[in-house]
Amino acid sequence: METGIFVKKMIKGLAAALAVGLVVLLTMMFINIFSKTEAQEIPVILPEVVLIEAADFKKEPVGVQAEGTVEAKEQAELKSQVNAPVAEIRVAVGDKVRKGDVLIVLANSDYQAQLMQMRFSLESAKAQLKGVQALKQVQSAKLSELVAGTRPEEMALSETKVKNALKTLSNSKISLENTRAKTQGDMAVILDGALAEMDKAVVVGLSALHVITEIQYHSFQQGAQERIKIANHKAEAIEMLLGETGTGEWIYEFIDPLSGGVRGKLSEIKNNPTEENVLATLSRMTEAMGKIMETLDIITQRNTLSQEAVANLLSAKNIVVAEKGALGGKEKAVMAQQIGNRNAIASSEIQMREAESALEMAQKELDIKRVGARKEQLEAQQAQLRQSEAAVIAQEAVVSQAAAGVSNFQALYEKTLIRAPISGVISAVPVKAGELVTLGQAVISLVNTDTLEIKSYLSEMDFTHIENKRIKEGSPVVIGESIKGKVSRIAPSLDPKTKKIEVDIEVADPDAGLIVGQNVTVGFANGQGGREPLEFYIPLQSVAVTSKGAFVYTVNQDSVVKEVSVKTGKVNGEFVEVKEGIDTGMRLLSSAAGMIPGQQVTVKKDGQ
């Protein structure tokens, strides 16, 4: 028992001794280390900072902002001035056109024919005017000769005039006969071509009726509504082309021999193909092709139609359409030849009448010179001169009337040609070829994208900027983010309904990417001289806010921190507005956290 207690006391004593020794050892080690530290200089580590350029955070001041709409100074919506089908569309959306270009052509064959006729009338009237003017001159000369008396050389000259006039009259008669013969021959060729085309049209029509009949019997059940509808239209087409009624269910073996209708009229006029009956038959044949086309159009392309039937149907449509167009071409050719023939014959007749008149005057002149002038002859010649003068006045009135007719039909013809009133780009073509347009209907729109402007409106609250001339004509404007412009016009007063004032802005760069109709934000510069002092939006971490105010920090050439007092404004996201205290040449510490004025720092270089 005592031995165990003794052992325990010895262990406790050894533990205490070891503890004291450890403390002494640690104390000596600390003293040794401290002594070495005192003997060596400890290096100072300076905080690293990053500088930012104040100019990168400069905000161009905008005093007033508004919404605006992009428009073109020059833009046009063209409307039809007549009721007519669209014959041709020569442009598409996006095409550039020049002023005066023809964009759309409306059907105008009637106007063309009438204009041609009026031009002929005008030329004929002018020719007749020249004739009566020449006659007046001759009558005046004859009167002068009667008064002066006849000399031998004048007698010889008058005899020569009569001979020449006789020869001219003979030549003019021959020319008239030749002209009549030529015009008849030319017309005969045109009429023969029209008859041949109508023969072809009959074949085309019968072929199309074969296709209709084949589909009617093989693709539609008898009594079905669609088959009845086809039969009704088919019957109308056959009645017009071949002259037989109630043929809707006939097969082509019974249809082909029919010879009435326009087919019969064609056979009849071949014995006497006058211009009038050929034109009338062409018109009826064209109408018959139209009836056949209507029948083809009503046949529904259902799943029950075979591929062969569909192909035959489409082929028949194409052939009938082409033949209808060919018939129309022949009709126009006959009408054009009629006008040409009338013009040629009228011109030859005028020449002959002028030759007859010249001969008559030459003969009278010779007779007078042979017998000498008597009082009654002088009086008669004076009367003839007065008649010639009156004829000139009357013919001048005819020429004026004919010229007015040409101008009238020229104006009507021009209304069928939709021309570009300005140079620009096509923005809309709301019609299609073949569509019937009515008077006043919009047919095309175009804009001149080289002359863009912004229509904006300022509220009543912003009117003081205009009164103070801070916003005026010529003031700079920022469109969107960076597009430049300037005020081109300010309305003289507020709109009484909207209580806003219109401000027009001219776009400096037409290629800036703006689109007509686009809504944009516009900023008007404000302040003296049109600009306010520069403002900055710098990162929040670059500003230190204390009880003494707000500060930013810069460093001098010795890398010592310098405190700069600033005036802050509104916060926008991670940035704060600085209204005063910063200029564009300053470099700021990117972070103001922990910075002390007078503290030396290390400026971190770019890229490190």
Image (tube, rainbow, N blue to C red):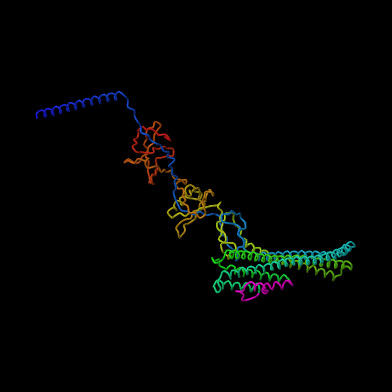
* 133 in magenta: no
| Quarter of the rendering occupied by the C terminus | top left
Residue 553 occupies quadrant: top left
Q: Is residue 405 visible?
A: no
Q: Position of residue 275 (x, y in %)?
A: 72, 70
Q: x%, y% of residue 298?
A: 57, 69
Q: Nearer the viewer, residue 553 or 94?
A: 94
485 vs 442, nearest the viewer: 442
In the image, the segment drawn in magenta is 243-272
Q: Position of residue 103 (x, y in %)?
A: 61, 58
- Vertical placement of residue 388 versus 27, above or below: below
Q: Image check: 92 left or right of 479? A: right
Q: Residue furthest left?
A: 2
Q: Nearer the viewer, residue 417 or 338?
A: 338
Image side of residue 218 versus residue 388, left or right? left
**In this orientation, which residue lies closer to the viewer: 230 or 567?**
230
Q: How many marks?
A: 0
Residue 458 sits in quarter? bottom left
> Which quarter of the image is occupied by the N terminus?
top left
**Residue 115 sits in quarter:** bottom right
Q: Is residue 336 visible?
A: yes
Q: Is residue 254 magenta?
A: yes
Please state the horizontal and vertical placement of residue 30, each as a whole percent of the image: 25, 26
Whether residue 439 sits left or right of residue 46 in the image: it is: right
